[in-house]
């Protein structure tokens, strides 16, 4: 998390400032959790005023949705190969295993995602549209990872998405569950991937 040693404010573009606020918030979530996190904590961590945080994120829901969007931007790119398409079930299994392992390092973020996702089922919730769009995007990204080697990549994407969402909820209740091992067991059964 950035720390401020110079009392003079650093000049950043609006995009860079927004990204910094989100990165600070993500780091603070892992320490303080959703309920313990305040706008004042975020402002202090970013070295800006409380009002500056509110300028970019007027509500805590806006801030949390920003954090989830930022996570989505980097997650799949950070674990999927950038120099070639995923070529087979074993490589696909490894990509998803890396994503699961990454998520397991951030339980507060996973809890935030689960809570907001459930709350947003109501059409009036501020996150309703975000989660609807995220589901479409997630299915498309998973399908794209399987397109070159699986006969029905859209069906596989749906099955994987359901498996991962259920697995994360189970893990939030019981941290003794090894999500990566459970995912690999699922891949052995569904995709016939050998260890």
Image: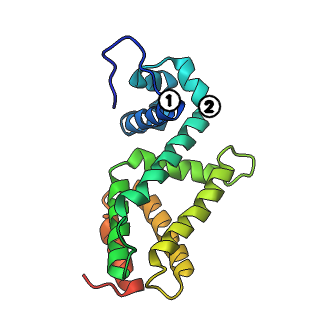
Which residue is at a point 49% across and 63% down the rendered structure image?
A: 165
- Between residues 52 and 135, which one lies in front from this camera angle? 52
Q: CA distance from mark 2 to mark 1?
A: 21 Å
SS at mark 1 in the image: loop
**Which residue is farthest left?**
195
Residue 171 x/y as whole percent: 39, 59
**Which residue is farthest top?**
7
| Residue 74 appears in view | yes
Which residue is at a point 67% across and 55% down the rendered structure image?
A: 121
| Residue 100 appears in view | no
Provide the residue designation for mark 2. 59
Residue 58 x/y as whole percent: 63, 29
Q: On the picture, is 69 further left or further right than 8?
A: right
SS at mark 2 in the image: loop
Determine crowd level at label 2: few under 14, some 14-19, many 20+ residues with C-alpha closer than 10 A. Answer: few
In the image, residue 166 sits, relative to residue 123, either above or below, namely below
Determine crowd level at label 1: few under 14, some 14-19, many 20+ residues with C-alpha closer than 10 A. Answer: few
Provide the residue designation for mark 1. 13
Q: On the picture, is 15 further left or further right than 102?
A: right
Mark 1 or mark 2, which is nearer the start of the sequence? 1
């Amino acid at each position: 998390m950035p720390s401020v040693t110079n009392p003079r404010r650093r000049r950043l573009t609006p995009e860079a400032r927004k990204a910094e606020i989100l990165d600070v918030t993500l780091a603070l979530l892992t320490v303080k959790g959703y309920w313990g996190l305040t706008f004042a904590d975020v402002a202090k961590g970013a070295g800006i005023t409380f009002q500056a945080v509110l300028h970019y994120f007027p509500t805590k829901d806006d801030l949390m949705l920003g954090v989830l969007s930022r996570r989505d931007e980097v997650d799949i790119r950070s674990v999927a190969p950038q120099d070639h398409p995923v070529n087979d079930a074993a490589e696909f299994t490894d990509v998803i295993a890396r994503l699961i392992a990454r998520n397991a390092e951030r339980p507060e973020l996973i809890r935030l995602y689960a809570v907001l996702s459930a709350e947003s089922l109501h059409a009036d919730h501020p996150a309703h549209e975000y989660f609807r769009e995220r589901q479409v995007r997630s299915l498309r990204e998973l399908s794209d990872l399987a397109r070159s080697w699986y006969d029905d990549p859209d069906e596989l994407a749906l099955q994987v998405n359901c498996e991962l969402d259920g697995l994360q909820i189970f893990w939030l209740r019981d941290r003794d569950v090894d999500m990566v091992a459970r995912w690999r067991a699922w891949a052995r059964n569904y995709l016939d991937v050998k260890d």
